[in-house]
Amino acid sequence: MHRAAEKAITLQNRFRTDYCGQLGPECENRSVRLGGWVHRKRDHGGLIFIDLRDHSGICQLVIQPEQQDLFDAAGHLHSESVICVEGTVVRRSAETVNSRLASGQIEVVVSALSLEGEAQPLPFPVADDVQTSEELRLKYRFIDLRREKLHENIIFRSSLTAEVRSYLVERGFIEIQTPILTSSSPEGARDFLVPSRLHPGKFYALPQAPQQFKQLLMVAGFPRYFQIAPCFRDEDARADRSPGEFYQIDMEMAFIEQDDLFEILEGMFRHLTETMSKKRITAYPFPRISYKDVMNRFGTDKPDLRIPLEIRDVTSLFVNSSFKVFASNTREGSCVKALVLKGRGGESRLFYDKAEKRARELGSAGLAYIQFREEGPKGPVVKFLGEEEMERLKTELGLETGDVVFFGAGKWESTCRIMGGMRTYFGDLFELDRDELSFCWIVDFPMYEYNEESKKIDFSHNPFSMPQGEMEALDTMQPLDILAYQYDIVCNGIELSSGAIRNHRPDIMYRAFEIAGYSKDEVNSRFGHMIDAFKLGAPPHGGIAPGLDRLVMILRDEQNIREVIAFPMNQSAQDLMMSAPSEVMEQQLKELCLKIELPPAKEEKK
C-alpha cells in the first residue's frame, strides 16, 4: 500500500491513534487504536488473525481466546466489514515476519473491538485479484477503489497533481479558475449543453477547454497562468480518452517564444518522471521533429520512437521503372515508401498473409514485399523488377540475405499513414522497454491544407496559431508552403497535448482567415469578442495543455485510462454507479421550457 498517509495529521480520537501501514518495531509495547476494513481473516483454532486495511496499508491483528466475547465477535466478522480496535504492538518472531508488508515486523494484540460497519457479501472480492467484468467494477466503483492497484493509482494521481502545482508555482505561474458555464463553441467537438432557466430557449455549454479564457488572461496582464482544468467533450471513448470529461494541465504564458514553452514543459516532465516514477526519459532535451519529417520517417504525427523501425523513401529509385505501379507514383504528390525488417525474410506464409490483411484494414489495396533468401529474392513484385533495380534497392536500403522489405505506393499522406500503421503493427515483434519514455516534439505543422471535398484551402490544424513569418509569409508565400508555430508533445506513441504560439494581432488574423475563404465580417461575427480584446492591447503569448489523465496513465503503466480515474464512465458514456444519464421530472423540464422529442424507435430486422 502507498505510504502517502505518513504526511497526514495523526488523529487522537476514539477511532484511531495510528495508521496500519505506519506501525513498525519502534512502536513496540505501545497502546494503539486502529480503524479500517477486514482485508482477510484466518482462524487457526486457538488464535484468530485479521489483516486490517486502511489507506496507509495493512497491519496484522491477533485475537486471543482468553477474552471469549472478543474472540466470538471476531469469529463472526465478514470480509470488508469496518472495525475499530484497541491493542498493543508486539514484535513478530523472526520466522513470522512478513517482508511484503510495511508493518510486517509487528502485529497488534487486540484488547477491544467494535464493529462500525458490517459488510454484506460483496459483488466481487477486494483482497484477491479475481478477474471481474468492467460493468460490475464500474457499478460498484467504491468497492473497486479499495483494491490495492487502483487505490494506488488514485493516490499517485493526487501526488502528481500536487507536484505539478508546486513546480509551476515555483516558476511564477498563477493558478486561476475559469468558468464552467460558458458559451457554445461550434468549431470544436460536440458541446455538452446546459439549458438556462432564467433565459428560456438559451443554453450554456460546458467548456471543451479554457482556451479563450486563458488567452484573455494574457490580455488582462497575467504573465503565467495554469489550472488543473476540467474539460467536457461529447465524444466517443477509447483506451486513452475518457468519454464526456477529462482533466488537463492548462498553461499559457505571455511574452514567450516556442523555445521558452518547450523548456518549461520538458523540465516539468523530467521532474515528474524522476520524482514520481522509476521510468527514464530516452533523450533530454526532447527531440524535435518536423511534421513533414515525422510523416516521412514514421508515418504518423504521434510516433512511438521505441520501435526500432523507420520508413524509407525510395521514390527516386523507380522513376523509370518498368513496374508501372511504382513508376506511376513517382510524380509530385505521390511516393513509394519502404519498410525493412532485418532477419525476417524467412517467416511463414501466414506471417505475410496477416501483414497484408492489416495493410488492407489500413486502407491499402495490398502489400508488396520482397524476401531476400539464400536462393534469391522472392515475393509478389520480384518479377516486375529488373536486376539493376534490385541491386540499387539493396544498396540504398542496406539489404542482406534474410531481410524482407515491404512497400507502399500512392498519394503521399495516405501512403505515409498506411506505412506508419504497418510500422506500429510490426512493432509487436520487438520487446519494447516499458520503463523508457520516448518524448518528442512534433513541430512545423502546415498552416493550411487543400480540402479535396470542398476544392478550397482550409486551415490544417489551429486557425488561431501565429504563422511562421507572420504577415510577410501570408502575403508572399504559397498557402500550402506556410508553416505555423504549432506543436504536439508525444510520448511512446501517445499524444499528450497540442499547443501553439497564438496569433495575437488582428491584422494577421484577418489575413490568415481571408486565405481560407473567410470575410472580415464572418471573422467578426464568429470571433468578434477575441478580436476586440486583441485590439485593446494583446501581448505575444502561447500555451499548451497536457492531459493529466494520459500522463498518469503513462507513468503508472496502465493500458486503459479508466484505471487512473476515480469515477469514470463506461464506453457508452454512462455512469453505472450513479445511473447517469437519467430521465428528469416533467416539472424540471417545464421550468426550463423544454420538451423531449425522442427519435422514432428503429425497427428490428427480421
Image: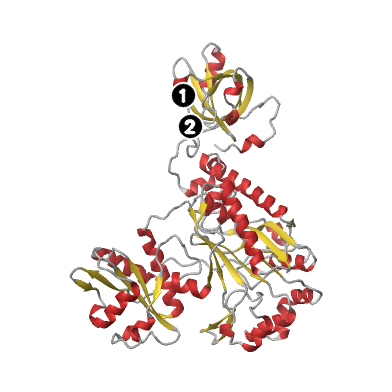
> Which residue, given by chain and number where applicable, does mark 2 sit on?
100
Q: Report, in whole angstroms, how far the alpha carbon at label 1 lies from the one at label 2.
A: 18 Å
Residue 370 place in picture, x, y as percent: 27, 73
Viewer-nearest of discs 1 and 2 = 2
Which quadrant of the figure has residue 182?
bottom right
Is residue 302 at all visible to an observer of this figure?
A: yes
Residue at the top extreme, as displayed: 66
Q: Is the residue marked by circle 2 packed among few (<14), some (14-19), or many (20+) residues within 10 Å?
A: few
Earlier along the polypeptide chain: callout 1 or callout 2?
1
Secondary structure under the numbered disc 1 in the rendered image? strand
**Residue at position x 56%, y 12% from top?**
67
Q: Is residue 604 left or right of residue 29?
A: left
**Residue at position x 48%, y 49% from top?**
134
**Residue at position x 32%, y 73% from top?**
367
Image quadrant for the C terminus? bottom left
For badge 1, the amino acid type reads Arg
Q: Is residue 314 left or right of residue 581?
A: left
Image quadrant for the N terminus? top right
Secondary structure under the numbered disc 2 in the rendered image? loop
Q: Which mark is residue 426?
A: none
Residue at the left extreme, as displayed: 375
Is residue 384 at all visible to an observer of this figure?
A: no
Residue 72 place in picture, x, y as percent: 52, 17
**Count of marks overlaid on the render:** 2
Q: Which mark is residue 42?
A: 1
Residue 123 place in picture, x, y as percent: 49, 39
- Does the CB distance between marks 1 and 2 fall below 8 Å? no
Q: Nearer the viewer, residue 352 or 255?
A: 255
Q: Is residue 92 left or right of residue 590?
A: left
Q: How is the image coloured?
A: secondary structure
Which quadrant of the figure has residue 228?
bottom right
Q: Is the residue marked by circle 1 packed among few (<14), some (14-19), or many (20+) residues within 10 Å?
A: few
